[in-house]
Every structure is written in structure tokens, then in C-alpha cells.
Image: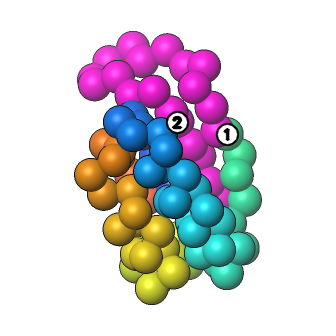
């Protein structure tokens, strides 16, 4: 059953955030990730408002979690820390 990363991000330093944007795709490719939604046009109806929103599909929950904890993604995440606020949730799809 597929699983999804649902990420909400507000970038504070766009120049430094580019380092993350350069590294993160390497991790996603290793785990066969597929971007289903990505953009800034969104309406937050409840909860905190973020600027960017991303939905990424993985083959299954274990693969999504493994991608997040991978060395490749953690290297990218280090570049994001301090330059963007992010909320990332991994959730199972429905059968």
C-alpha cells in the first residue's frame, strides 16, 4: 500500500534553502519517490499556515520512513535546518 509524505514548509532564507533543494532530490530518487503535489497556492483552513506544501508518494510506509532516515536525506535536512520551518508527516494510503 502506498504511503505519503505530507510536508508544509515556510522558507526563511531562500538562498540557503537552495542547498537543501539541491540535495533532497538525490534521496527521493533512491527511494522511488513520486511528487504528487507541490506549490504555494493553497488555503490553510485550520492550524498554522505554511507557505509551501508538498505531497510525495512512496511504495509503502517502510520506504517513506527509510527515506526520511537515510543518510542522503539527513544531509539535505541539515541544510534546511535553521533556514526553513517544516512540518512533515508520513501517512499510509488507503486500500
Q: Secondary structure at mark 2?
A: strand
The residue depicted at 72 percent of the width and 59 percent of the height is: 34
In the displayed structure, does residue 3 sit left or right of residue 48?
Answer: right
Locate the C terminus by quadrant.
Answer: bottom right
Q: Position of residue 46 (x, y in %)?
A: 32, 18
Depth check: 6 or 41 in front?
Answer: 41
Q: How many marks?
A: 2
For the residues marked 1 and 2, what is the alpha-carbon distance in whole angstroms?
A: 7 Å
Colouring mode (rainbow / by chain / secondary structure / one colour): rainbow
Where is 70 relative to 15, above or below?
A: below
Q: Which residue is mark 1?
A: 37
* Whether label 1 touches label 2, CB < 8 Å: yes
In the displayed structure, does residue 72 sit left or right of residue 30?
Answer: left
Report the magenta residues as a range: 38-58
**Counting other residues with Cα less than 10 Å from the Cα at mark 1, is it few (<14), some (14-19), or many (20 or more)?**
few
Q: Please report whichever mark, 1 or 2, sits nearer to the chain's N-terminal start.
A: 1
Depth check: 5 or 93 in front?
Answer: 5
Magenta-drawn stretch contains 39? yes
Using the image, tell me which numbered label, if any, was put on residue 53: 2
**Residue 67 seen by the camera:** yes
Snapshot quadrant of residue 31: bottom right
Q: Secondary structure at mark 1?
A: strand
**Residue at far bottom of view:** 71
Amino acid at each position: 500500500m502506498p504511503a505519503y509524505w505530507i510536508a508544509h514548509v515556510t522558507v526563511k532564507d531562500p538562498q540557503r534553502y537552495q542547498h537543501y533543494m539541491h540535495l533532497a532530490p538525490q534521496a527521493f530518487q533512491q527511494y522511488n519517490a513520486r511528487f504528487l503535489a507541490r506549490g504555494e497556492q493553497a488555503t490553510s483552513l485550520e492550524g498554522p499556515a505554511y507557505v509551501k506544501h508538498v505531497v510525495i508518494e512512496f511504495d509503502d510506509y517502510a520506504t517513506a520512513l527509510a527515506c526520511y532516515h537515510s543518510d542522503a536525506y539527513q544531509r539535505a535536512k541539515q541544510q534546511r535546518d535553521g533556514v526553513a520551518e517544516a512540518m512533515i508527516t508520513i501517512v499510509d494510503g488507503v486500500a
